[in-house]
Image (spheres, helix red, strand yellow):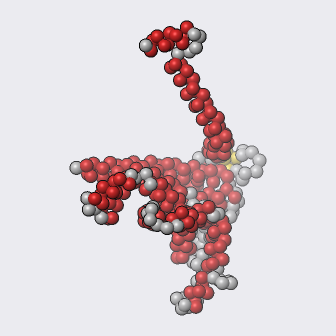
């Protein structure tokens, strides 16, 4: 019957059905590529090309004006590796990530469980409220925080003095013991909404029938969280952790606005370090702009992040497999 239909289509001058299906798929894929073309052009122009160009600048000493002509070979890489401030800034970046990521993930998951409750009234309002800091500019937040912790006008110091929690004003951003802690707290609050939305999306993919069956079997909330929610969130949880870590390693604008890496480099992170090398500023080794040094630092940092991300994914997947195998036994 099929062969007869194909012969009739061919005899009538039309292509076989399989050929027509392939043509329809090609047309569909063609429109997909057309829709993706603007994004690919922007990606190539503003991401791929700058990365390739910056790799070429690593071999030159260049202040960014004119064409680079002072070839120094691998000397820029040697200077970065020998610079103690680079390693301090890398340590500060890891400290920031070590505090922000686990605190954010725990709080986001806990709040997502509450907001995912269908019996909760005004859930949409609460979700919007917690997501608002994400869409607020980090530069604006930095300026507001500076005003709140400053020693003039109405500030946190005035409130603490009135309730007798301190006996004299504290220079919160000028004290190395407090500056990094404030950046961490503000960072947790500012990007908290991302992880909240991710966890909410993951929770909404869990079939409600699983919870209903567990309730009929007499399972409590803790048991349902342990044996249903956690296993079902494991795959999306790996993605959330990786995105959260990568996001914290991109910290720049908040630090630049609040402290610019100070005081005494106590809050210098790698991205502000690279910025100061490229454009000059508070970095002691970057009084004059040096695009070559900045490019070398960004290249080294990029390699470290790629390696760390690969190790992170491998470790998380290995842990997920072990837990899945153990649960099956």
For the N terminus, the quadrant is: top left
Q: Residue at x 34, y 51 (%)?
A: 320
Q: Is residue 5 left or right of residue 66?
A: left
Judged left or right of residue 289, residue 225 is left
Between 196 and 210, the one lying in front of the other is 210
Q: Is residue 44 visible?
A: no
- Identify the residue at horizontal 54%, vertical 63% (top origin): 124
Q: Is residue 153 visible?
A: yes
Please, is residue 156 above or below residue 323 in the view?
A: below
> Residue 238: image x %, image y %?
42, 52
Residue 139, picture quadrant: bottom right
Viewer-side residue, 181 vs 58: 181
Q: Quadrant of residue 213?
A: bottom left
Q: Nearer the viewer, residue 30 or 5?
A: 5
The residue furthest right is: 66
Query: What residue lies at 58% left-to-right and 31% top-to-bottom?
Result: 29
Residue placed farthest to the left in the image?
Answer: 329
User: Whole-percent x and y of residue 84?
Assistant: 54, 62
To which quarter of the image does residue 280 belong? bottom right
């Amino acid at each position: 019957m099929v062969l007869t239909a194909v012969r009739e289509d061919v005899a009538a001058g039309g292509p076989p059905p399989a050929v027509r299906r392939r043509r329809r798929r090609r047309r569909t894929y063609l429109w997909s590529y057309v829709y993706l073309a603007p994004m690919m052009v922007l990606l190539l122009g503003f991401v791929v090309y700058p990365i390739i160009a910056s790799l070429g600048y690593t071999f030159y000493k260049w202040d960014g004006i004119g064409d680079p002509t002072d070839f120094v070979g691998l000397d820029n890489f040697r200077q970065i590796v020998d610079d103690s401030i680079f390693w301090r800034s890398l340590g500060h970046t890891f400290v920031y990530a070590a505090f922000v990521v686990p605190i954010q993930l725990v709080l986001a998951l806990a709040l997502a469980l509450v907001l995912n409750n269908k019996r909760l009234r005004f859930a949409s309002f609460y979700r919007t409220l917690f997501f608002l800091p994400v869409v607020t500019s980090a530069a604006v937040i930095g300026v507001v925080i500076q005003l709140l912790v400053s020693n003039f006008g109405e500030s946190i110091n005035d409130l603490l003095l009135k309730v007798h929690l301190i006996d004299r004003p504290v220079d919160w951003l000028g004290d190395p013991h407090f500056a990094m802690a404030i950046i961490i707290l503000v960072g947790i609050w500012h990007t908290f909404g991302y992880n909240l939305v991710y966890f909410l999306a993951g929770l909404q993919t869990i079939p409600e029938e699983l919870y209903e069956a567990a309730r009929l079997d007499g399972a409590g909330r803790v048991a349902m969280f342990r044996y249903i929610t956690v296993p079902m969130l494991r795959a999306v949880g790996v993605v959330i952790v990786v995105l959260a870590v990568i996001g914290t390693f991109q910290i720049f604008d908040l630090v630049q606005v609040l402290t610019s890496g100070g005081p005494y480099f106590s809050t210098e992170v790698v991205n502000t370090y690279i910025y100061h090398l490229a454009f000059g500023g508070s970095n002691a080794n970057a009084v004059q702009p040096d695009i070559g040094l900045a490019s070398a630092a960004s290249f080294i940092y990029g390699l470290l992040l790629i390696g760390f991300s690969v190790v992170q994914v491998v470790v998380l997947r290995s842990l997920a497999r072990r837990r899945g195998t153990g649960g099956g036994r």
